Amino acid sequence: MIKYFLILLPFYLASCSNSDSTDDETTTTTSTTSENGSVDISSVVQNVFDSENGVTVNVEGETIIITSTGLPDHKTPYWDIEGMEHELYESFPTYIIDDTDAYDDDAEELSRLISTDSEGNTLITYQNNMNMEMIAFDYSMEIPTNPSEAENKEQTDLGLIGLALNGVPIYNDSEGRDVLGVVAMSTFDSAGAHPGPNSDYHYHTASQLSIYAEDDGSTYPTVNDSNLIGFLRDGFPIYGRQEADGTYPDDLDENGGHIAATEDFTEGIYHYHCSSENYLNTGWYVMKAGAYHGTPGPSSGN
């Protein structure tokens, strides 16, 4: 097994509970339950998405339309790989590897990333591939005000399956037409994200802080916590690996979710959690795999 030295600290983002604060005033989001038992998410959605990062939320009847540029509000090397002068630029992360088994099949391709430090630790320092930049897009995602379980569950596909609160797209555990592998992950920044061939920046996993991290990573969507990450295309929220009390849920269904109360949805709602499985023993935790619980609405922009 591979062992990583991680710094796991709480984040300022909303967790399985959320509130927005401006100066000294705090606005608590609320939700309501309809006659058929589904939860009206519109007030929560309107309050938690980051308008300061260009995200817009509009409620039109029974539909919520969310738009964004897809650019992050946190540090990443993809802001300026060549010049390294952008105010939000940070270096690619480095991790300690105790066991290289997860990398054996791709050892030759990844050998350029492997080094040894003065204490004899084997290190891997991530690096971009041919995708060296990220650009703004016109993303739009439509979700229902009252999401409900679908009779026939649809598998998540390539591309945008949801939006994080900062407007960055959430992807599943696929990379191109293949399952996400260690070569693709070696292009991640500390937030568990990278741009695709179209320079479209997106998250695949929860964050993993570099051993050389200069801060606590509190601007990333989630590390090992209960943060509210965002909403998927079916309208259901997705949270970090933990519950609000710091425990890990043990009753998730095959699609990574369950019905429980959160501080955002005190009457209870179906919601997803990041996987608690150490993906390929790399220290990364996939945000979402499998099918949607509800019916995904239309999206555009990538």
Image (tube, rainbow, N blue to C red):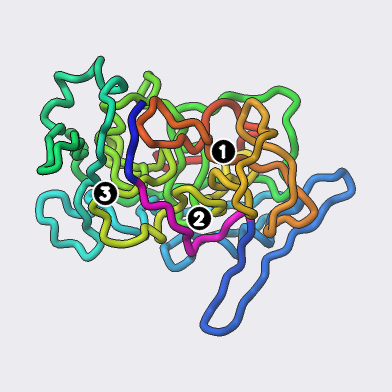
The verdict on residue 30 being magenta is: no
Mark 2 lies on residue: 165
Residue pictured at 68% horizontal, 66% vertical? 29
Query: Left or right: where does residue 83 sit relative to residue 8?
Result: left
Residue 34: image location, x then y, percent: 84, 51
Cα distance between the residues tagged 2 and 1:
18 Å
SS class of the residue under badge 1? loop
Return the residue found at the far front: 119
Query: 275 and 211: which one is in front?
Result: 211
How packed is label 3: few (under 14 Cα within 10 Å), some, or many (20 or more)?
some
Q: What segment is highlighted magenta in the picture?
A: 6-16
Mark 3 lies on residue: 211
Q: Which image quarter is the C terminus in? A: top left
Q: Between disc 2 and disc 3, whose residue precedes?
A: 2
Query: Left or right: where does residue 200 sit relative to residue 148?
Result: left
Cα distance between the residues tagged 1 and 3:
39 Å
Cα distance between the residues tagged 2 and 3:
26 Å
Residue 72 visible somewhere in the drawing: yes
Question: Are circles 1 and 3 on residues that touch, CB within 8 Å?
Answer: no
Foreground disc of the pair 2, 1: 2
Name the main secondary structure of what is drawn in magenta.
loop
Mark 1 lies on residue: 298
